[in-house]
Amino acid sequence: MEIPVKSRQHITVAIVGLFWLKALLLNVVFQPENEPAVTGVRDLFSTATFYGLINLTVLLLLWYWSGGKLTGLGLKKEGFGKHLMIGVLFGIGMLLQHYLLTAPLFRSFVPATAHEGIDMSLLFQDTADIPFWILLSIFKGGFEEELWRSFEMNSFKRVFGKAGLVFGLIAGAVFFGLQHSYQGTDSVISTGFDGLLYGLIYLRRKSVAEAMAAHATFDIISILAGYYLYA
């Protein structure tokens, strides 16, 4: 018996909820046991790329299975280059607001334990790793994470309308922040806020290319700054 499209869309929303539950368990409930070990940028690149490809495969299979098309996720040929350039500008703006405004602001309100976590300086020692960082920023930070964010919002929108879209935007930002819990509580809050802004960038023109370019630009510049700061 064939499953109706509407039922498939409900199942897709439930699966998104399971992904969020996994993020909650791994990054809050079992966070101490789940704290990542720093084994090198190239190992990080391989692991993140592997799981990113799995996430993309699941995303696309679910989206098509539930009756969606790529245009419904904001992937459009028209004006693609223009949206990328606009996204780069948004990325620079995101960088400025994060490091000059929201990150210092949130850091001033969180507990003193907020900076516990892995020693990030260990990831910025070898300049030969920069190409791996850039590729990771484009694929993982830009393409995979922002396509997943669009998938979350649009999956809820199809089932619950505008209310679902707003819920997907906010909940997706919360769990995006939780995925950075290894960097400290202040990073959870400021990164979650960044996730909210990336979602709004997408909603501005329903162009995921803008959000992808903004996220990738933010990550690339942050990484280059990391090499400067930890040199």
Image: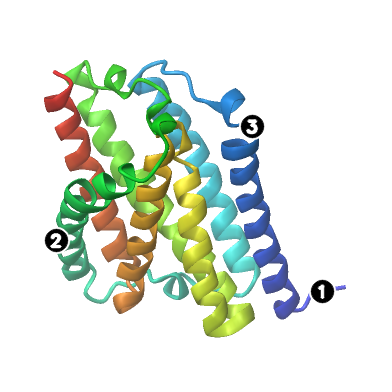
Q: In this view, does 113 lie to the left or right of 158?
A: left
- Compare marks 1 and 2 and give the one earlier in the sequence: 1
Residue type for callout 2: Leu
Instruction: Report which residue position mark 2 lands on.
Output: 89
Viewport quadrant of the N terminus: bottom right
Instruction: Tell me: residue 143, above or below residue 30.
Output: below
Whole-number angstrom distance, CA of label 3 to CA of label 1: 39 Å
Instruction: Tell me: residue 101, above or below residue 163.
Output: above
Instruction: Give the residue displayed 22% in from the left and 56% down from the top.
Output: 94
- Residue 2, numbered label: 1
Instruction: Give the residue displayed 42% in from the left and 51% down from the top.
Output: 145
**Farthest bottom residue in view:** 161
Residue 64, by quadrant, is: bottom right
Instruction: Give the residue displayed 45% in from the left and 65% down from the top.
Output: 150
Look at discs 3 and 2 and give the one toward the viewer: 3
Residue 183, by quadrant, is: top left
